[in-house]
Amino acid sequence: MTRDEAFSQFLLRMGDNTLILGHRVSEWCGHAPVLEEDIALANTALDLIGQTQMWLGLAGEIDGGKSADELAFLRDAWDFRNVLLVEVPNDDFGRTLMRQFLFDAWHSIMLGRLMKSSDEQVAAIAVKASKEVTYHLERSSDTVVGLGDGTEESHARMQEALDYLWPYVGEMFVSDEVDTEMAAAGIAPNPADLREEYDALITRVLTEATLSIPDSRFAHKGGRDGRMHTEHLGHLLTQMQWLQRAYPGASW
Amino acid sequence: MPRASTDQIWAWLDAVPDPEIPVISVVDLGIVRDVRWDAETLKVTVTPTYSGCPATSVISMDIETALRDHGIEDVRIETSISPAWTTDWLSGKGRAKLEEFGIAPPQPAGGPERCPRCGSKAVEKVSQFGSTPCKAHWRCTDCLEPFDYFKCI
């Protein structure tokens, strides 16, 4: 694998995570339990899609002059490189916010490291995105604590959400040859090296939320290397890509 | 026609309102980073507030339109994300106008100093997110009015 091939995979992983999660979160627009939460979810989705433009924009430049839009709307499921966690359906508000928290915690640590990337453009995107993600993490942590340490009903739902999502956490810390290449070039950290800081962060918040972290370290994998996505990604793409597929080149 | 000075151009840009918070200008907001002539082309460097802010493309269009109205035909808008925009770049005039308009200006402490309507310091956060990406939603517990707070980033 050449340096450019690895770099392009790395950028797709970053951009596909924010794109797919941004789309998932945007599905709440107009449906959230209260207006303030609706606005917060839509704003979070907007930030994530904005970050996608930067990551996929850079990926496209390296990958022979494709635009971020082409990468987002004209690839099929097997070409996506997001972790499986972000394609899991929203289910209830609790699971959506638990998924957000588990992702935000990783995202904030990852961006913190990328701010020191040897690649100037990667560092610039990370500095910009990190400011936004600090707010995402503050909100998802507060909400996980509020609902986890809330009523009997909300506590049970948050524990159920954590149990359901936990097997998807491990994939964020798996390293492969792309990561080895990126770490050697000083462009990105080795994902496995983020785990300790991640565990400390989520343990602190989940303990305050009176929730129990499952013991198992079993991890569903296959998203970030594109080997096997969940069936949910295809369904998501049929909606997200519909307009560009039905009316190729449409713009406004 | 002689080229307008960059000082003059900054003054013209200071009259271009932010599309979502029209009480302040794009210069007050600190998103115009550089104005320079490159031969007959005027280059204006703009930085987005938040990466997904939908106002960014409207702002570029408004800047271009304003400069054309002042007779500058050849304008090029360049977008730069580094250094990343910070609320420290809001002008003093911009901060005062925000508060007068009912939006609490950003504070390093991470929350509004006082209610922009009644001045009370008894305020509480409703949500980290508000009506635009750059604002949070707060409320005054004295006059009971909700208000926007311009987030510090």
Image (spheres, rainbow, N blue to C red):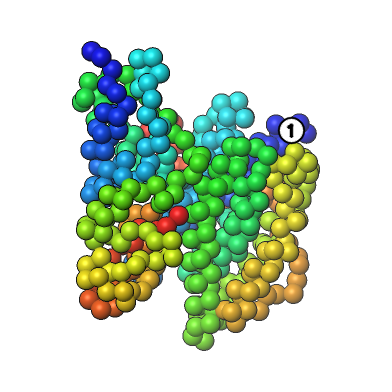
- Compared with A24, A71 (above or below) is above
Residue A169, quarter of the rendered image:
bottom right
Residue occupying the far bottom of the picture: A152
Point out the image quarter for the N terminus of chain A. top right
Which residue is painted at 30% across and 33% down in the image?
B10
Point out the image quarter for the C terminus of chain A. top left
Amino acid identity at mark 1: Arg
Q: Position of residue A59 (x, y in %)?
A: 60, 35
Q: Position of residue B12 (x, y in %)?
A: 24, 32
Which residue is painted at 59% across and 57% down in the image?
A108
Which residue is painted at 78% across and 41% down in the image?
A184
Q: Position of residue A61 (x, y in %)?
A: 58, 29
Which residue is painted at 36% across and 74% down in the image?
B124
Q: Position of residue B105 (x, y in %)?
A: 33, 58
The residue tagged 1 is A3
Label 1 marks a residue whose chain is: A
Q: Is residue A228 shown left or right of residue B20?
A: right
Secondary structure category for the residue under label 1: helix
Q: Is residue A12 shown left or right of residue B128?
A: right
Residue B3, quarter of the rendered image:
top left
